Image (spheres, helix red, strand yellow):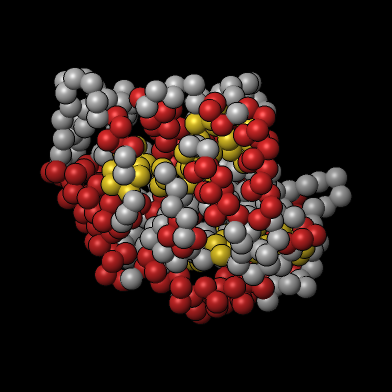
Amino acid sequence: MNDIARGATFAPEHTAQQELDALWMPFTANRQFKDRPRMLARAEGMHYYTPEGRQVLDGSAGLWCVNAGHCRKPIVEAIAQAAGSLDFAPTFNMGHPMAFELAQRLIDLAGAPFNHVFFCNSGSEAVDSALKIALGYHRLRGEGQRTRFIGRERGYHGVGFGGVSVGGIVGNRKMFGTMLPGVDHLPQTWNLKETAFSRGQPAWGEHLADELERIIALHDASTIAAVIVEPVAGSAGVLVPPKGYLQKLRAITEKHGILLIFDEVITGFGRVGQPFGWQRFGVAPDLYTVAKGINSGTVPMGAVFARAGIYETFMQGPAGAIEFAHGYTYSAHPLACAAALATLDVYRDEGLLTRVGELEQHWEDALHSLKGVRNVIDIRNIGLMGAVELAPRDGAPGARGYDAHCKAFFEEDLLVRYTGDIIAMSPPLIVSRNQIDEIVARLRRALEKID
Ligand code: PLP
């Protein structure tokens, strides 16, 4: 336990029913949760601790974000120091040194062809920022008619209106009207018959990228601003790109002058074995978004990386004119920057951004050992991401996934994510081989206990 945690007041063992009621929880079945709360009070390294003191193995890096492990001392100290020395500084028409230092560090990490970073506070904001950059870029080049976006079915790009419009998860869209006009979607790439139990990138599915040509033919390329996809769809349950698929998207977008945006909110910062997913897949987009792992989930932060030429396109007009009328009060917040700088040091000193390369085979073999366990219909993996898909119960889709999650949490002291009947995992990048085996053993026991 670090010094700051030692001095802290711990959460009470029981949260009063009235307090449970007061909070409108995000992306949660509120009534179900409040009937059976699943509380986390403290965290350290690879573990959470419940208010009663139960130690829970973190199989999901919090929410795909705590890549350096929990409450790492250098990161905690950097945040504390920033809070005591520069609590806030405006970044509209003003600056503070950490913002510039962090931008440079990130650009150094990305390397060519990326040369500028725009800061925001979340993945959702990063996506909306990237979509706006794409529109502005075309307009400034005299192609203001390029206003359409193309996302993908089952894509998750956060919850801003831009993000849900290009996103492809029905439940996140249906309540919110017509959203952004002029958005089309590529087909998703998972197929039970063709890709079940693939290890790494499936051999089937490259042809699905050709659908982009069909959509372009329908609207004409001159009307399309950008295509946005996650290199690996995370929130929809780890949908790994088929071999050759991302390369094909890149070739088609390039041919038609359409920007390619990768949403790397999950795949960024070492999750798939390179600092960024595009490096692993060998496909450089024009813009890409990050958040989560940028400071190991400690302080809200997101960013957009821009390929050389995009920022420069905006730098026209009178020098006193604001070139991009967009930004957030907390863009490059000092606490977030301090946390990110310290996190990048931890990543560098411990080799975490490439460590997954050493673990990936072990992770893959461990996960796939669950083949044959009751109700398991698919297992997929890449980097340190993995999913185990369960057959839905008749007439009750999602119930089995929820049961598996609860069994794992309450009876096996394991935190995994569930989305419908898919169990998704993405442990912190500090995980040991033994802990990988432990995650899989606990999940196996949980799955064997549910019907
Ligand atoms: N984009 C992707 C690919 C994500 O996985 C997420 C969150 O999981 C987001 C965007 C949204 O990020 P946030 O919840 O920080 O707004």
Q: In terms of image quadrants, where is residue 450?
A: bottom right
Q: Is residue 309 left or right of residue 438?
A: left
- Residue 189 visible, this angle: yes
Q: Quadrant of the N terminus?
A: bottom left
Q: Is residue 390 left or right of residue 219?
A: right
Q: Residue at x 24, y 29 (%)?
A: 315
**Image vertical order of residue 384 relative to residue 321, above or below:** below
- The spot of residue 52 in percent (x, y) is 49, 59
- The spot of residue 34 in percent (x, y) is 61, 41
Q: Residue at x 77, y 61 (%)?
A: 194
Q: Is residue 161 left or right of residue 102?
A: right
Q: Residue at x 64, y 48 (%)?
A: 209
**Image vertical order of residue 340 relative to residue 431, above or below:** above
**Image vertical order of residue 29 relative to residue 162, above or below:** below
Which residue in the rendered view is the most extreme toward the front? 255
**Viewer-nearest residue: 92 or 411:** 92
**Viewer-nearest residue: 222 or 284:** 222
**Viewer-nearest residue: 164 or 229:** 229
Q: In terms of image quadrants, where is residue 375?
A: bottom right
**Image vertical order of residue 339 relative to residue 326, above or below:** below
Q: Residue at x 56, y 31 (%)?
A: 221
- Residue 12 visible, this angle: no
**Viewer-nearest residue: 21 or 168:** 168
- The spot of residue 378 in percent (x, y) is 73, 63
- The spot of residue 226 in percent (x, y) is 50, 35
Q: Is residue 344 left or right of residue 382?
A: left
What count of labels does the image hold?
Answer: 0
Which residue in the rendered view is the most extreme toward the right? 394
Q: Quadrant of the C terminus?
A: bottom right
